[in-house]
Amino acid sequence: MADDRLTIAGREFKSRLWVGTGKYKDFVETKKAIEASGADVVTVAVRRVNITDRSKENLLDYIDPKKYTILPNTAGCYTVEDAVRYSRLARAAGVSDLVKLEVIGDEKTLFPDTAGLIEAAKILIKEGFIVLPYTNDDPIVAKKLVDIGCPAVMPLAAPIGSGLGIRNPYNLRIILETVKVPIIVDAGVGTASDAALAMEYGADAVLMNTAIAGAKDPIMMAEAMRYAVDAGRLAYRAGRIPRKLYATASSPIEGML
Amino acid sequence: MHIQVNGEQRTLATGITVAGLLKDLDIRPDRVAVELNLNILDRSEFDGRSLQEGDRIEIISFIGGGAWRRA
């Protein structure tokens, strides 16, 4: 699918499957799963360095920032101030202006605080960040995020880590129709068919973490997701047949006895 | 002198620089960001910036996470 690259803010990406790096058993498993997924965008969280136990290895020893696009996120941030602070720290620690912006509204659902999200995005865009916002499956908010300068929008399929799949396919389809920037379905995917479905609807990419890391065999699931995203993308581009209530024979009547 | 490093009180040699602290802690400067009293330092400032009594310093890096619950 070399002729079908995803472009966001002038950056070109090979893979339409983006992956998180949390919840793996260890860094070796993380690395193997990412390799199996074929992803070239890898999201990471921003946290204090452990200063009491320096024996702990660094994630970036396993995920080469030259090979992958490291996409820092503001996971765990519940206020505009925190999300902006974490984004600035991420930029200082990393090499790029990219941030997956999350302003979380509630601990139980981890749904985004979309008012806070728009406010934080405005501040960061003014500072030159490329803001990829994790948002609700709300077409109006998605449009507002584009209007203020987000080069892509990342609506959830379902709550983070829930594995429920696309809970509101109609909203997602409205977002895909009305928002003219790449749409990356982020969070809530449970298994391969969820990812394929998102791509069949016309999503430009899918980001997931728990669906792979939490599977019995994360490396095998990473491979499954890779095929699902590719298959869904091809099916979208190929154009599916319309749904009909009654049968249409595939074989001709002529020549029957 | 007393300095708060990543939320922990530490007693450090007077006049230690940010680069010196990172070296003492065995932290590679190219992998982290440093915030001193809520101001982010540029990496080029690590060598020249000396810490003062009562400073609060945060050293952060990237860890595994997709979208995660607060620890």
Image: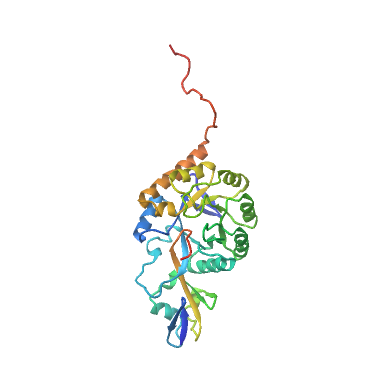
Q: Nearer the viewer, residue B18 or A232?
A: A232
Q: Where is residue A112 shown, x and y percent of the image?
A: 56, 58
Left or right of A78? Residue A223 is left
Left or right of A5? Residue A126 is right
Q: Where is residue A38 shown, x and y percent of the image?
A: 41, 50
In the image, residue A101 above or below residue B25? above
- The quarter in which the C terminus of chain A is drawn is top left
The number of numbered discs placed on residues in the rendered structure image is 0
In the image, residue A222 above or below residue A76? above
- Residue A14 visible? The answer is no
Q: Where is residue B42 shown, x and y percent of the image?
A: 51, 74
- Residue A214 visible? The answer is yes
Q: Quadrant of residue A210?
A: bottom left
Q: Where is residue A44 shown, x and y percent of the image?
A: 46, 61
Q: How is the image coloured?
A: rainbow
Residue at image position (47%, 23%) is A250
Q: Nearer the viewer, residue A83 or A131?
A: A83
